[in-house]
Amino acid sequence: MEKNWPLWEIFVRSKNGLEHRHFGSLHAADAEMAMENARDVYTRRSEGVSIWVVESINITASNPADNGELFEPAQDKVYRHPTFYNLPDEVKHM
Amino acid sequence: MSEQEVKNLEEIFEARIARDEKIEPKDWMPEKYRKTHIRQISQHAHSEIIGMLPEGNWITRAPSLRRKVALLAKVQDEAGHGLYLYSACETLGISRAELYEQLHSGKAKYSSIFNYPTVTWADMGAIGWLVDGAAIINQVPLCNTSYGPYARAMVRVCKEESFHQRQGFEIMLSLCNGSEEQKAMAQDALNRWWWPSLMMLGPVDAESVHTEQSMKWKLKRKTNDELRQQFIDQTVPQAELLGITVPDPDLKWNEETGHYDFGEIDWDEFWQVVKGHGPCNKERMDARVNAWEEGTWVRDAAMAHAEKKNIKVAKAS
Ligand SMILES: [Fe+2]
Ligand SMILES: [Fe+2]
């Protein structure tokens, strides 16, 4: 009656001051085991000080097919960048 | 999708790779790209896992605590490498269960080198030095391969490999600086592992069927023969440093080419081992399949425990 262990995504903070970053994924029966396995698989050489484990099915990912709709509108919004604004050279510290 | 549409997508896809863009799991990809990657990445993962067996054989008999912790750490790293690679492979839409099934049924291959026996402690030295050495040469170019999850896994793997090779070389060095018997043991290990290590770099270019496509997809940056030459050129001076002899009477420095010339590789032996007739193929598969089958009740119990806990949490809230 074999049931496969679900997949978990592992996020690790390398040191305080940095964000958690996606490190990879692994299979585990529950969150506790995912945490123990993540420690062994991803932090054998002091790569982290904090771990998040999230079951993969709980992640909703955007679809690359929607990339145009999602991300292209930002491309013509140059006024969101400081270089869009023309200021005389005499203005300092801005 | 019409044939023309697929062709257009394929052209866009190839152009992306040519521009050194990475391909990520949810991106559209040609079926052949997906299949080739599943084959190569899973073969690679299986090799890491099976590769633990010949070295695991010596953990309890390591000659000192220093050697024992190092070997244990190395074998644990190889388990990690297998896991990174299985995860990368699963992003292509194949399950871990299917991947194991392919390994256990013999449908999937793993590196033939692991079908040779480890009969003396010196084999731990020779494996780290030569087998991990050849693996590094194979793997470093893959850190830049086109499939994102594979490339990221390889960066992690490569970072960990150099300790493997150094611990192996240190074992060889101790033996070569030891008694006559110890030095003879090191020589014997080199004699047995040299040729299989050269075979690890793959069939000669003329007979390698996937090279052209693999180059395009950056699954390969150099041909098998180029990689083999690189391995020989860097390893021969190391053997000289140890004071042991590479078992190839035709091995000679070629002033003109700036490389070592070397003797004929016994490819019949290579194909025999690939086909399952190596000294340890059966032993390796039996060990792997037994470990999986005898672990079934543990996996089931863990799953049942997790489900019971979930029900309790649901009831309490
Ligand atoms: Fe490895
Ligand atoms: Fe290794």
Image (tube, coloured by chain):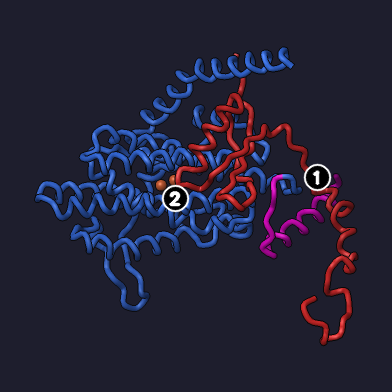
Chain colours: A red, B blue
Q: Residue at x 61, y 23 (%)?
A: A4
Residue B220 figure quarter: bottom right
Question: Does mark 2 have its CB less than 8 Å from ligand 2?
Answer: yes
Task: Give the chain of mark 1.
Answer: A
In the rendered view of the protein, which quadrant contains the C terminus of chain B? top right
Q: Tell me which segment is drawn in magenta.
A: B1-25
The answer to whether residue B236 is seen in the rendering is yes
* Badge number at residue A63: 1
User: Would residue B284 be counted in the magenta stretch?
Assistant: no
Q: How many marks?
A: 2
Q: Is residue B97 above or below residue A94?
A: above
Q: Is residue B302 left or right of residue B248?
A: right
- Judging depth in this view, the residue of A11 and B75 nearest the camera is A11
Q: Residue at x 86, y 47 (%)?
A: B2
The answer to whether residue B89 is seen in the rendering is no
Name the dominant secondary structure of the magenta segment. Answer: helix
Q: Which residue is mark 2?
A: B160
**Rendering coords of residue B124 (x, y %):** 28, 44
